[in-house]
Image (spheres, rainbow, N blue to C red):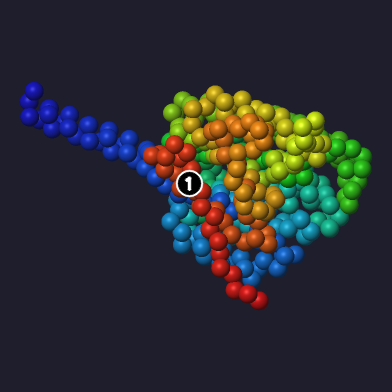
Amino acid sequence: MKKSSLIKLAFITWVSMNSLTAFSAPFSFGLWGDMPYAKAGDSAKFPAVLKSINTAKIDFSIFVGDIKDGSSKCTDDVYTNAIQLFDSMSRPVVYIPGDNEWTDCHRLNNGGYDSQERLAHIRKVMFTKPFSFGPKGIPLESAAGSDSLYVENKRFSKNKVMFVTLNIPGSNNNKILDEKDCKNKSARTPLQCEQGNAEYTERDAANIAWMQSSFQKAKSQKSHGIVLAFQGDPGFDLPETEDLDESKAPIVSGYQAFLQAVVKETENFEGQVLLVHGDTHFFKVDKPLYSPTKILPNLTRLQTFGSPNLHWVKVTVDHKRHNIFDIEPVMIQHDKP
């Protein structure tokens, strides 16, 4: 073989080896949400959280919803202020809608809004670009490519990990149980509740389809892991008894079809699945599926901090580990009042 051909072959081999190394190189990302809450007096503590995230060695962060508390009005400035905040961060921010910015806006102390109108407003204002917020925005694939309505459902890949965000908020995923649930501290009419349940049914199906297609894409890309992120707590922490599976209680029934679909996909995925949510405001890492007595080994649940616990979570992806997700709670030292 000629010397020039040997040099060319060596160069191609070097490029290939370094490309593989880059694809599997460690990286870190942040998780935060459910903050700041005015009713909890978070304004004094929130800047320290932002400073910590901005100076951390992470590639991006995911905000898992709730840009305000559940007792303040859902006015238009809430959403524009959140956009300004996310765009001011030093790293890209991927945003997920939470219950306080749409599902619960029907409450009287939230202004008695039509929840679906607020969701439409979020889609119009906060999901206008195919990129994340912040500098050097991450290109995001949207479910709008297959269904124009669900523009808030996103995904992207980095170094053999698929990230999937879904609009699955608190308050039982916007599923309304009965007339009492409909009217409780609410400005909703019976018609709005009927429309809300129709919205839940259609979005739940769209979320399942987006999650399933994301698993398929991850498999085709030979991904080592998948991160599924949404806001609502699907009820893992309800106690279970021998005679009754309380995780299937009505108050969390709006999550069950999605979780069952996640289980099926995880069983057929060789890599690790990190399921991230907020809503309950306490940091927790566990393996809640299938049940307390039987574990789905490659699925880990990560519940993020939230007001008044103003901290965040750093996750480092290390492909040398069997469980590629190394989870670290970042505790912020807040000055005492």
Residue 15: x, y in percent?
25, 36
Compared to residue 289, the image places residue 80 above or below, namely below
In the drawing, does residue 58 fall left or right of residue 291?
A: left
Residue at 64% from the left image edge and 71% from the top image edge: 44
Residue displayed at 86% across by 40% down = 192
> Which quadrant does the N terminus fall into?
top left
* Percent coordinates x, y for residue 270 in the rendering: 49, 27
- Foreground of the two, 272 or 138: 272
Question: Amino acid type of disc 1?
Answer: Asp
The one of 108 and 297 positioned closer to us in this rendering: 297
Mark 1: which secondary structure? Answer: strand
Direction from residue 197 to residue 232 in the image, left or right: left
Q: How busy is the neighbourhood of tag 1: few (under 14 within 10 Å), some, or many (20 plus)?
A: few
276 lies left or right of 1: right
Identify the residue at horizontal 57%, vertical 35% (top origin): 299
Above or below, comparing residue 250 to residue 282 in the picture: above
In-front residue for pair 172/267: 267
Q: Residue furthest left?
A: 2
Task: Decide if residue 264 is in sight here.
Answer: yes
Image quadrant where residue 255 sits:
top right
Q: Which residue is mark 1?
A: 326
Residue at the bottom extreme, as displayed = 337
| Residue 92 visible in this rendered orientation of the protein | no
Give coordinates of residue 135: x percent, y percent: 47, 54
